[in-house]
Image (cartoon, rainbow, N blue to C red):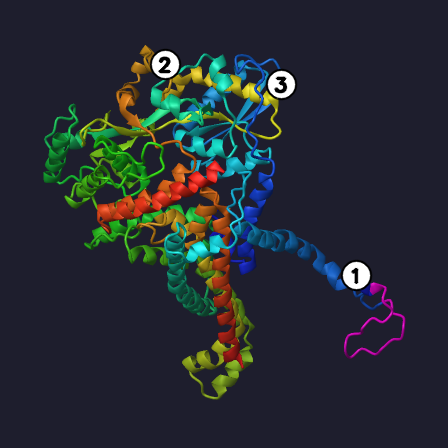
């Protein structure tokens, strides 16, 4: 995809047709084998593997600091299970969600993988992944063993497609040195709206731009969602058939974010990842960013920082979060041995989720989250306090792409001070309503 | 089909050749020969261009998600939606077409003129000229991902090197990638830097093809440098111009990576080009029908531009 321009040099318009139509044709041919999700479940749901030696392909998008942790777990699993050889392949998430469906439908690609909660509905509806109710039953996984939100996120049409691995919420990172410089108590980060705004004002007085506000989904969009939920609003209505993100709560949340820029607490025109780079460099005091940044920040020498739950800007506590879930691919024809081996693998990693927590994640299992070992992971345990009130983007088919052309550009234009928050969100919401309706028709048929 | 020609007794001879009766000399080319030479390419052309292009039309007449069993026929709706103000595709599509048009308009003149100037300089007999030729061409060998990430960091408004040095000089920060018109300045600038070497090499080859006798003759007639450039160089490069302009327009109209990586289509969706939106529609929303329809609209637009382009150059050539 990213090579279009380079290739374009030697291309004619016919070749261009190839790029667009050919991609469609390839996928369409690939699509002939897909669609059937009625998989007969055999075996014991993943307790043991008794078949012949088997190779299992495991794909994920852990391109950051979390990749090596998963790699170690995979190695350990393979050394303990001589009959199951798991090979891990890591690709960028955006590419992953494009490649996996077409690969799987031709019988290629991964046997087992990871998907985000908000992608599960789409991939279940498109027949990319198979139901895993038998795994959950055989392993005795029950709702009571998980945070309710993360447990329900694995369901689509009352069937389980995802075995929850983790929860990764937005957290509040603060630079202790800059707080001290501004005369604030570095061990007492602001947790209320009044305190937070006062702290930003103090820092402005000390010549520090306290909270770099990104105009992109990561992290400005996630910040906006969190404040929206804190104000009692929601992105969509109950069954995700209508957009509600332009409600008073949505507009107020976006206005608050834009004011951070307007009042001079953030520089204008923050670029991709600039808020993170500035935080690393000691130029940005407060950053609302994902839990996955814990390890990268620990590696920055001389940076004194802490992490806390998001400050409560609205009337209740809330924070954006995502969840990684294990899935088994609907690779036709299904190889029962590979499916069974994949289930054993999922079960094993799920029980090892304390190791995964060290990569900068919160385990989905209550037992692991409440263990002494997890509580000793100071930063992770601090952000785990948010688990009772985190929010996910709902797992309705096609939902992740609705945001792409609606609230993402709306937040972008507002934070870049191009459009007023209400006007931007209203236009985005009416477009989102139509997309939701199109998705409903498409996936219902 | 074409192969039937062999068995036919009356093979038509190329003009100017003496009719040789019913037989063929062993040295004569078989009428099959051109087709045998063409076959490998024709096969690829058929499989990778003709069939997908026709199949694409079929896709564009459906609501088509390759992985869903139901692909309902919608007739021309994917096309009419592009002209209906209340559809989900019309607004973003024409917005992206406008972005593509703007980029083409801004980048093509620069990519036609600047490489010519550089080619003229590189055509001089200077010591170490090969080094400079390589230098100007060097960025072109890099992939778009490399130059994209490189420039995204260099041009970052707050943490980028470019604004840092502007600050050292006491100048204001420039929102290179987050506001208009700067985002276009950056995208066009980066593209010119990246690809001018290609056009320069084409020009250079064209320049070296011009007969030095013509310059000598012009000199003898008393033409100065400028007159020699206008009356010898420019006419000598005409076929090269046609090629460079055509290829540059098509390449610019297919711009994808620079916006995708450097500005991510922002601010808002201002720098989201047609290819980005088509790719998002087809490959992220899995709405292949609409994406295929958009592709044909873009192809049609490029076809018109190409026809106009050829017509303009042909008239001048007469």
Depth check: give the residue in front, A322 or B242: A322
- Mark 1 lies on residue: B3
Quarter holding the C terminus of chain B is bottom right
Distance, label 3 to label 1, CA atoms, is 54 Å
Specify whether residue B18 is painted magenta.
Answer: yes
Q: Position of residue A225 (x, y in %)?
A: 27, 35
Depth check: give the residue in front, A210 or B123: A210
Q: Which residues are magenta?
A: B6-26
**Helix, strand or loop for disc 1:** helix
Note whether residue B273 is visible: yes
Note whether residue A303 is visible: no
The structure residue drawn at horizontal position 49% and vertical position 84%, both measured from the top left corner, is B218
Quarter holding the N terminus of chain B is bottom right
- Mark 3 lies on residue: A53
The structure residue drawn at horizontal position 41% and vertical position 14%, both measured from the top left corner, is A142
Q: Is residue B196 above or below residue A345?
A: below
Parent chain of label 1: B
Q: Residues within 10 Å of mark 2 (few under 14, many from 20)?
A: few
- Mark 2 lies on residue: A144
**Helix, strand or loop for disc 2:** helix
Specify whether residue A258 is painted magenta.
Answer: no
Depth check: give the residue in front, A175 or A126: A126
Q: Earlier in the sequence, mark 2 or mark 3?
A: 3
Q: Is residue B30 left or right of residue B137?
A: right
Q: Residue A390 occupies which quadrant of the picture?
A: top left
Q: Residue A32 occupies which quadrant of the picture?
A: top right
Distance, label 2 to label 3, CA atoms, is 35 Å
Q: Is residue B253 above or below residue A195?
A: below
């Amino acid at each position: 995809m990213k090579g279009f321009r380079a290739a374009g040099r030697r291309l004619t318009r016919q070749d261009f047709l190839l790029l667009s139509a050919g991609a469609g044709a390839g996928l369409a041919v690939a699509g002939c084998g897909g669609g059937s999700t009625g998989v007969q479940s055999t075996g014991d749901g993943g307790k043991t593997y008794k078949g012949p030696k088997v190779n299992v392909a495991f794909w994920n998008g852990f391109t950051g600091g979390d990749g090596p942790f998963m790699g170690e777990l995979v190695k350990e699993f393979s050394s303990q299970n001589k009959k199951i050889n798991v090979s891990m392949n890591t690709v960028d998430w955006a590419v992953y969600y494009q490649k996996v469906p077409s690969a799987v439908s031709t019988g290629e690609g991964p046997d087992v993988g990871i998907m985000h909660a908000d992608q599960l509905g789409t991939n279940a509806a498109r027949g990319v992944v198979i139901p895993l109710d038998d795994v959950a039953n055989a392993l005795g996984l029950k709702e009571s063993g998980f945070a309710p939100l993360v447990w329900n996120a694995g369901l689509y049409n009352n069937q389980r497609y995802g075995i929850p691995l983790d929860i990764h919420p937005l957290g509040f990172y603060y630079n202790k040195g800059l707080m001290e410089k501004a005369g604030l108590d570095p061990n007492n980060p602001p947790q209320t709206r009044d305190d937070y705004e006062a702290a930003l004002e103090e820092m402005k007085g000390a010549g520090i731009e306290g909270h770099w506000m990104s105009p992109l989904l990561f992290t400005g969009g996630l910040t906006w969602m969190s404040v929206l939920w804190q104000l009692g609003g929601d992105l969509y209505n109950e069954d995700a058939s209508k957009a509600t993100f332009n409600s008073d709560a949505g507009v107020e949340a976006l206005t608050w974010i834009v004011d951070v820029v307007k009042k001079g607490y953030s520089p204008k025109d923050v670029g991709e990842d600039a808020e993170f780079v500035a935080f690393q460099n000691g130029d940005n005091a407060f950053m609302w960013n994902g839990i996955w940044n814990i390890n990268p920040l620990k590696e920055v020498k001389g940076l004194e920082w802490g992490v806390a739950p998001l400050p409560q800007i609205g009337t209740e506590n809330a924070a954006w979060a995502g969840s990684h879930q294990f899935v088994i691919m609907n690779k036709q024809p299904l190889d029962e041995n590979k499916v069974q081996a994949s289930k054993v693998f999922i079960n094993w990693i799920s029980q090892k989720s304390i190791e995964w927590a060290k990569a900068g994640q919160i385990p989905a299992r209550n037992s692991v989250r409440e263990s002494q070992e997890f509580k000793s992971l100071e930063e992770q345990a601090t952000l785990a306090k948010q688990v009772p009130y985190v929010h996910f983007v709902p797992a309705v088919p096609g939902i992740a792409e609705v945001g792409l052309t609606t609230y993402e550009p709306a937040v972008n234009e507002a934070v870049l001070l191009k459009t007023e928050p209400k006007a931007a969100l209203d236009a985005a919401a009416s477009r989102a309503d139509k997309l939701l309706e199109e998705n409903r028709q498409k996936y219902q048929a | 089909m074409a192969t039937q020609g062999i068995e036919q007794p009356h093979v038509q001879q190329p003009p100017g050749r003496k009719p040789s009766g019913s037989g063929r000399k062993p040295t004569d080319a078989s009428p099959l020969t051109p087709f045998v030479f063409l076959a490998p390419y024709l096969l690829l052309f058929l499989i990778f261009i003709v069939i997908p292009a026709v199949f694409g039309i079929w896709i564009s007449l459906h609501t088509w998600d390759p992985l869903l069993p139901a692909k309902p026929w919608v007739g021309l709706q994917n096309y009419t939606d592009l002209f209906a103000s209340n559809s989900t595709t019309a607004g973003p599509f024409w917005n992206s077409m406008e972005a593509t048009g703007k980029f083409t308009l801004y980048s093509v003149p620069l990519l036609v003129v600047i490489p010519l100037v550089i080619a003229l300089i590189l055509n001089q007999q200077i010591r170490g000229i090969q080094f400079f030729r390589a230098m100007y061409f060097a960025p072109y060998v890099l992939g778009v991902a490399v130059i994209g990430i490189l420039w995204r960091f260099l041009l970052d408004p707050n943490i980028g090197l470019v604004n840092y040095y502007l600050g050292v000089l006491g100048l204001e920060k420039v929102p290179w990638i987050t506001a208009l018109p700067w985002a276009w300045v950056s995208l066009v600038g980066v593209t010119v830097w990246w690809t001018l070497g290609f056009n320069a090499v084409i020009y250079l080859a064209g320049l070296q093809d011009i007969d030095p006798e013509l310059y000598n003759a012009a000199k003898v007639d008393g033409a100065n440098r400028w007159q020699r450039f206008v009356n010898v160089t420019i006419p000598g490069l005409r076929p090269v111009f046609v090629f460079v302009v055509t290829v540059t327009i098509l390449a610019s109209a297919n711009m994808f990576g620079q916006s995708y990586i450097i500005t991510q289509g922002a601010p808002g969706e201002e720098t989201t080009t047609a290819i980005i939106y088509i790719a998002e529609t087809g490959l992220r929303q899995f709405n292949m029908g609409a994406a295929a329809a958009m592709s044909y609209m873009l192809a049609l637009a490029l076809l018109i531009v190409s026809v106009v382009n050829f017509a303009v150059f042909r008239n001048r050539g007469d």
